[in-house]
């Protein structure tokens, strides 16, 4: 039953991406390209999502556990460091080039777009390039 | 620089409603599984095989399956809007590599940082969101106006 709820979360998340326009790379690019024909619609996605997550997370964190009395896995560190900013910069550049971020790419892949498959395979390669050699080196140089 | 609004494609209400659903889905995943709905983190976890705790894969697979099937299930009831992908293959591959690498290095993407993290008022997520938004706007300008798109 719990796994079904997790599946439904993924499903509702994907449907939200479809309805909002996030799963259409052309719309994403028209949002990020202010100097072109600017479509500011996607700013409203954050305006819709953040109040809901603000209230929802607050209630759950107050309770301190899941519906199934399991612990919450919340990000531990609060440190703003260089990799956070540089990583964000690299991600933003890729996002603007093709108009895909990870969630919408998976939605479009599921819809059967060949180009989304190419993007997702490249994204997986990017994740592995980071996680295997790069992160290994980082862990050696700075103990967690 | 004058800004021209593309009124013909402006969909504030649909985008707002889609955003509410995205927020609800994130809250659901935290309520039922105690996990942050960060897509790059969920997918990244699927690619880790050493020293993973019990139950590491099942919830991630269930969540990703929901995303993958969302278009098909939405299509049972409504017409699914098109995803217009104009980028050529070289740009798609470069973009995918940057998105994969950058989201792992920056510990999250649009979902984990901008929806969950900002909602939790995490300073880290606010900085990350400002960083990828600024980079996104700057890169779009460079790609589509300076180097010609």
Image: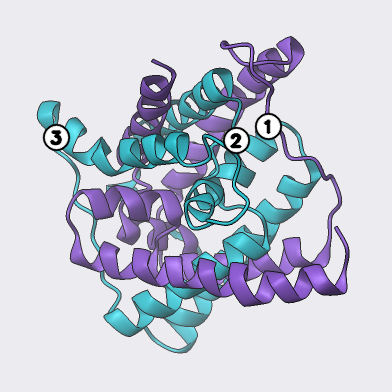
Spot occupied by residue A77 in the image (x, y as percentages of width and height) = 82, 45
Q: Is residue B135 above or below residue B55?
A: below
First in residue order: circle 3 vs circle 2: 2
Q: Which mark is residue B65?
A: none
Local packing at callout 3 (Cα closer than 10 Å; few below 14, some 14-19, many 20+) is: some
Question: Marks 1 and 2, Cα distance to the nearest angstrom?
Answer: 7 Å
Q: CA distance from mark 3 to mark 1?
A: 33 Å
- Position of B41 with respect to A80 (left or right) is left
Q: Which residue is mark 3?
A: B75
Q: Which residue is mark 2?
A: B36
Residue situated furthest bottom in the rendering: B147
Q: Residue at x 50, y 72 (%)?
A: A126
Q: Chain of mark 1?
A: A
Q: Residue at x 39, y 33 (%)?
A: A10
In the foreground, B27 or A18? B27
Quadrant in which residue A68 is drawn: top right
- In the image, the chain rendered in cyan is B
Q: Is residue A8 left or right of residue B25?
A: left
Which residue was labeled with disc 1? A73
Q: Are marks 3 and 2 in contact (CB under 8 Å)?
A: no
Q: Quadrant of the N terminus of chain B?
A: bottom right
């Amino acid at each position: 039953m719990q796994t079904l709820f997790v599946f439904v979360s993924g499903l509702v998340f994907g449907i939200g991406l479809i309805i909002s326009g996030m799963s259409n790379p052309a719309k994403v690019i028209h949002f990020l390209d202010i100097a072109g024909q600017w479509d500011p619609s996607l700013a409203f996605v954050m305006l819709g999502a953040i109040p809901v997550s603000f209230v929802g997370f607050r209630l759950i964190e107050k309770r301190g556990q899941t519906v199934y009395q399991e612990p919450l896995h919340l990000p531990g560190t609060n440190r703003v460091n260089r990799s956070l900013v540089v990583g964000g910069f690299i991600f933003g550049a890729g996002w603007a080039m093709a108009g895909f971020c990870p969630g919408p790419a998976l939605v479009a892949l599921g819809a059967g777009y060949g180009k989304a498959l190419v993007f997702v395979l490249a994204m997986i390669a990017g994740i592995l390039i980071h996680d295997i050699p790069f992160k290994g080196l980082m862990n050696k140089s700075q103990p967690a | 620089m004058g800004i021209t609004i593309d009124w013909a494609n402006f969909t504030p209400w649909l985008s707002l409603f889609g955003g509410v659903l995205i927020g609800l889905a994130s809250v659901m995943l935290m309520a039922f599984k105690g996990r942050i709905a960060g897509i790059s983190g969920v997918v990244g976890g699927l690619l880790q095989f050493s020293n993973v705790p019990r139950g590491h894969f099942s919830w991630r697979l269930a969540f990703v399956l929901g995303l993958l099937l969302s278009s098909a299930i939405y299509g049972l009831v409504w017409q699914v809007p098109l995803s217009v992908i104009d980028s050529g293959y070289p740009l798609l591959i470069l973009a995918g590599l940057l998105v994969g690498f950058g989201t792992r290095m920056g510990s999250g993407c649009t979902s984990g940082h901008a929806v969950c993290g900002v909602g939790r008022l995490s300073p880290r997520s606010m900085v990350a969101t400002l960083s990828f938004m600024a980079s996104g706007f700057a890169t779009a300008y460079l790609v589509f106006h300076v180097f010609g798109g």
